[in-house]
Amino acid sequence: MSLRDRLTRRQNGAAAPATAPAELAGEARPPATPRAPSVAATSGMYGRRAEVVPISPIEQVKMDLHRKLIERLDLEALEQIPDERLLNSEIRAVVIELLREESTPLTVADREDIIEQVLYEITGLGPIEPLFRDLSISDILVNGSKEIYIERGGRLTRVAASFRNDAHLLAVIDRIVSRVGRRVDESSPMVDARLPDGSRVNAIIPPLALDGPVLSIRRFGIDLSIQKLIDNGTLNTEMASLVAGCVAARLNILVSGGTGAGKTTLLNAMASFVPPDQRIITIEDAAELRLQQEHVVRLETRPPNAEGEGEVKARDLVKNALRMRPDRIIVGEVRSGEALDMLQAMNTGHEGSLTTIHANSPRDALARLETMILMAGANLPDKAMREQISSALDLIIQITRLSDGTRRITSMVEVTGMEGPVTATQEIFRYRRKGVSPAGEVIGEFEATGVRPTFMERLRVAGIEVSNDLFAEGVLR
Ligand SMILES: Nc1ncnc2c1ncn2[C@@H]1O[C@H](COP(=O)(O)OP(=O)(O)OP(=O)(O)O)[C@@H](O)[C@H]1O
Ligand SMILES: [Mg+2]
């Protein structure tokens, strides 16, 4: 039997369909997957439950054809083909062949459209694939099969796309996670994975998610180099030059911010200031960092298996990394006990480490670090804990997602040491919000507080020149 024959399910239904035809036939027509997704103007125009979005007659023909094709293709046989290019060309050939039997007149563009949709269905992310290909979208959030939201330019909106049903959504989730050797089912209903381009994926399914499977995709791979961050106003050139100096001079830096504030993005951009001759080891829960340097060793934690065994925590990886002759250790985010190991590493000759933390202010970040040290089971008195933190950390950079969706570095704080029993800090730069424009844009400016950081001496010794004028009190130009 030729490959093509094997890929086309015989009419007598010999091969088991990956998606049961009954599922496809017995339900309301799904809305078309738009090429350019139409974004709902306001999220309020939708109720809690999804309604069927009206589509044009030609779209309808395409959808019907598409469905027939999916029914006739042997999805399981297709999925066995490992080479993606071969797979794509095979699918294309089969679809063209099947389309020949159709009486409906189709333009070349329509035909291409259908082929593309079938390809998405079999090899990609199904109805969210077009969203994924739109590089201006940063997050894709699927709440059950009928509700899909996207974040674009910092704003969250609902789009008129949906999966056929929960089984369809689950099949896509399964495809994503099985590629990275993970699985999702009732016994392990939460899973982290990533897409081939590095985008981060989280899936959580019933019984933990009450209204159907939930898929959250955080795109990573949009070029957000430090220059882009300067261009979009996340920070300005002067601040960037100080950050560059601090990274190169091996200061230990903590990036702090809320969910989705842009911590990982900033960390990634900052890492570009690590000199190329240094050996960098990265530790993450789901590898997101994309460092430009050649000499990078990437490590990823592992969740426990279904029997609760085999877990490898960030802590274990930090300890292991210390035996790998690192010049720099970059931990994607400290969440727990690994904070202690990181601080200890910073204090014992592994300067120049970078990490992020989920916190709403630099003060909050310090408090959270203390909690994490406790999570590590270290029975340290408060003062000893703070000493550990203050001698390890040099700089905290707070990044914030403002109400208009833009990201700003809202504070840069030097950790100077201890003042009595507390960690002493001094702010160097801050973002001062002055108001909101009629269009809802936040108006504000970066300011220097007039404080010259004490670590400037370390930069000077490292041969890094930063002008003193930078720290003169007032608005940064
Ligand atoms: N400075 C920025 N300017 C514009 N967009 C940004 C910026 N930083 C991040 N983003 C976008 O916001 C999204 C979230 O970024 P990122 O993953 O860096 O945030 P995070 O704080 O690490 O999130 P999490 O808390 O989920 O780890 C990304 O899709 C990214 O493209
Ligand atoms: Mg992050």
Image: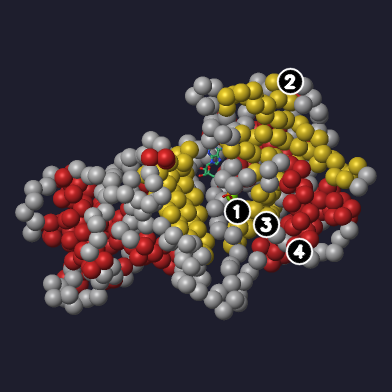
Which one is closest to the eye, mark 3 or mark 1?
3
Disc assigned to residue 376: 4
Q: Earlier in the sequence, mark 1 or mark 4?
A: 1
Q: Nearer the viewer, residue 265 or 370?
A: 370
For mark 4, give the secondary structure.
loop
Which one is closest to the eye, mark 1 or mark 4?
4
The CB of the residue at mark 4 lies under 8 Å from ligand 1: no
Disc assigned to residue 474: 2
Task: Give x and y (percent) for residue 429.
Answer: 72, 30
Residue drawn at x 46%, y 64% as measured from the top left: 205
Task: Give x and y (percent) for residue 2.
Answer: 17, 72
Q: CA distance from mark 1 to mark 4?
A: 30 Å
Q: What residue is disc 3 on?
A: 335
Q: What residue is disc 1 on?
A: 295
Residue drawn at x 51%, y 71% as measured from the top left: 188
**What type is the residue that disc 1 sits on?**
His
The quarter of the picture where residue 68 lies is bottom left
Q: Is residue 238 above or below residue 377?
A: above
Asked if the residue at tag 3 contacts the one at tag 4, i.e. Cβ–Cβ closer than 8 Å, the answer is no
Q: Earlier in the sequence, mark 4 or mark 2?
A: 4
Position of 211 compared to 423: left or right?
left
